[in-house]
Image: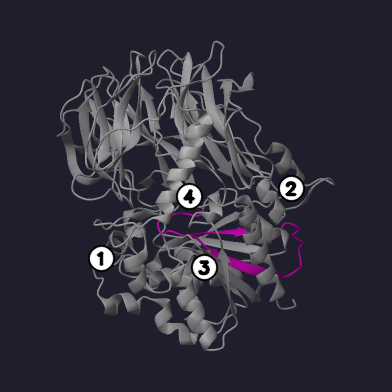
Amino acid sequence: MIKLEAGVMNVNQRLVTAEDIVKFQWPSNPTISPDGKLVVYEKTVVREKEDDYDTQLYLTDIRGTKSRVLTNAGSRNLAPAWSPDSRAIAFLSNRENGVQAWLLPLDGGEAVRLTRFRHGISSLFWSPDRQYIYGLVPVHTKTKNVEVFAWDKTTGEIDEQIARENKAWMAGPKRYDQPYYKLDGAGMHQDLTRQLVAIHVETGEWKQLTKEPYDISDPTISPDGTSIAFTANRDEPLIFGGQILHVPTAGGEVETLYSNQDARVPAYSPDGNQIAFLGNEEHCQLFVMDCAGGNVRLLSDEYPFSLEDYSFTDMYHLRYPLRPHWSRDGEWVYALSTREGKNEIIRFSREQNAASPEVVAGGQRTIFHFSYDGQDSLVIACSTPNHPGQIAFIDQTGEELRLDDCSDELMQELIVSWPEEFTYTSVDDWQIQGFLLKPAQFTLGKKYPVLLDIHGGPHSMFSFAYFHQMQLFAAQGFAVLYLNPRGSSGFGKEFSEAVHGDYGGKDHLDLLNGLAEALRRYDFLDESRVAVNGISYGGFMVNWLLTKTDRFFAAISEGCISNWISMYGTSDICPTFVDREFLGKTDLETLWRHSPLAYVDKVKTPLLLMHAEQDLRCPMEQAEQFFAHLKRQGNEVELLQMPDSSHGLLQIGKPSLRKARLQAMVEFVTARLPQG
């Protein structure tokens, strides 16, 4: 495993600052060419003047000896898709006419725009014969027809039309008869559904394949090119997974292959006879079924941990739904897992219970994307506690080669800490995982203040990943304690679901027990100087802890939940999310009993409530309610509203606001830090 040396400093190194958040280079989405010789990946950097991000495509050979930039126009060049002959790449770009499909030949020449769809396009993939590129295009639910920009309009005229239409829609009234009418980070739904289209590569002519009343997601084509499988939900809006359906590429009726509403990312076997897919939202598992539906088998039954990436970090990684990968002989299926603070690539036999699952790539790191050529080669995007993102090639012997140099120069300049992992016994004798990040300039014999950090989710996981916020507090002389209490992902189904119906119960005891264990285990921690912060579920837990104890000298609650009753009716993923998390017991009495606001009179700790103004996941009113009651009863409390930001501010917010957020956190805590 590639790993920068931890704890090695030189005279030219310096401490981490909040301003460093704009200096990272984030790689993502490495994809191996079908011939196994090349890798294309995305690289994202900050544009400080524009206060946004720039993503371009990079190409390297599989051994990392030759590398070049593929794109330089537009600010978002994403989701590259290799042609079957490895000679061209289709990709999405916003360089003109909104987000359109572009084609780049690798033997020379400029990228050519393939589409002019009025509402853009996404999810590109090729036909096996290279004649067509398919994608998803939003259409109005009433007309159900794809719309295109007129060919006689200039790019400037189209850009003006897009801006004018968007402004008119934002300013106009919006009327809904469905329960899920908004999405955090995207805003209010525009009465559009994503439908399949086929685009002829040579002529640019297109054909609409579906006109369904629901959104289509995760499309993939059969090896013979005759059928496209996808996920959707015919019965209700797609929130947490859906059914698997398919449609002939020649056109025809949509048929259901898998009727349970918990599936995603289907993938055909090389012979086209089977489809692998992921199912279940919280404890994700791997399934295989016949290509015509039926004969569903659970391949990961003997694997106790969750599939997919549930790691929690503040780094900007462009994450994509990770489809299972088949070996070319069709005997094995590869999937990404979340296990005990790490992400690993696991190989499963296609025959149920025929062989034990096998780790093919792991280590003390998080893997957030991978591509497999079906034979001997893997390419991964990964992060370690002292590096935000790397692209690496792994051969059949396990040897790894670095393919990029993202953020290397910056990381060599910074003093960063490597966490110490530990386990402790909590309620019911459950073993809980914890991490401690020492102060960046740790000295034996000194006592250090502690910051207890609580992750969101709750079905996510602190891991062996770089976390800039934590390194910033370590640079300020804090020891950062972060734990994976029950409810976290990566520790099995029972562990993940243990929080159901018990928010603020044994989960909060896991956190307090972890703090007590750390104070007992590490004699350099100052038990009289402990602060706490958390975001989303972590914000809920900060609020909850403050109603139970006054042992913290300061607290930060970000993107929080304070009132489950109003959360039930205002969040973009509710009522489904609360129904699931509370086991269907969503009467007012139960929701209020689990709400921190019900016990707000017991709060004594100085508190900073930070909240994004456009947060649709945990809406702004959650912080406002807690703030109003605390202020009314005379508490020391501040409310920091972040404009033009969603619940994803931590990872994908405007760079200036991400920097301001970090500065505000450090200022609030250090200003109240008791003398040691």
The quadrant in which the N terminus is found is: top right
The magenta stretch is 433-462
User: CA–CA distance between discs 4 and 2?
Assistant: 23 Å
Q: Which residue is mark 2?
A: 414
Q: Label 3 amino acid?
A: Gly
Give yes or no for contact between labels 3 and 2 (Cβ–Cβ under 8 Å). Answer: no
User: CA–CA distance between discs 1 and 3?
Assistant: 27 Å
Answer yes or no: is residue 1 visible.
no
Q: Taking 205 as reference, is 544 above or below it? A: below
Q: Nearer the viewer, residue 355 or 449?
A: 449
Q: Residue 40 shows which numbered tag?
A: none
Horizontal side of residue 390 vs 86, given as left or right:
right
Q: Which residue is mark 1?
A: 583
Q: Nearer the viewer, mark 3 or mark 2?
A: 2
Horizontal side of residue 436 vs 160, given as left or right:
right
Horizontal side of residue 618 vs 675, given as left or right:
left
Give yes or no for contact between labels 3 and 4 (Cβ–Cβ under 8 Å). Answer: no
Q: Nearer the viewer, mark 1 or mark 3?
A: 1
Q: Which residue is mark 4?
A: 311
Give yes or no for contact between labels 4 and 1 (Cβ–Cβ under 8 Å). Answer: no
Q: Nearer the viewer, residue 105 or 84?
A: 105
First along the sequence among labels 4 and 2: 4
User: CA–CA distance between discs 3 and 4?
Assistant: 20 Å
Q: Which residue is mark 3?
A: 514
The residue tagged with tag 2: helix, strand or loop?
strand
Name the dominant secondary structure of the magenta segment. Answer: loop
First along the sequence among labels 3 and 2: 2
The residue tagged with tag 1: helix, strand or loop?
loop
Q: Label 1 amino acid?
A: Leu
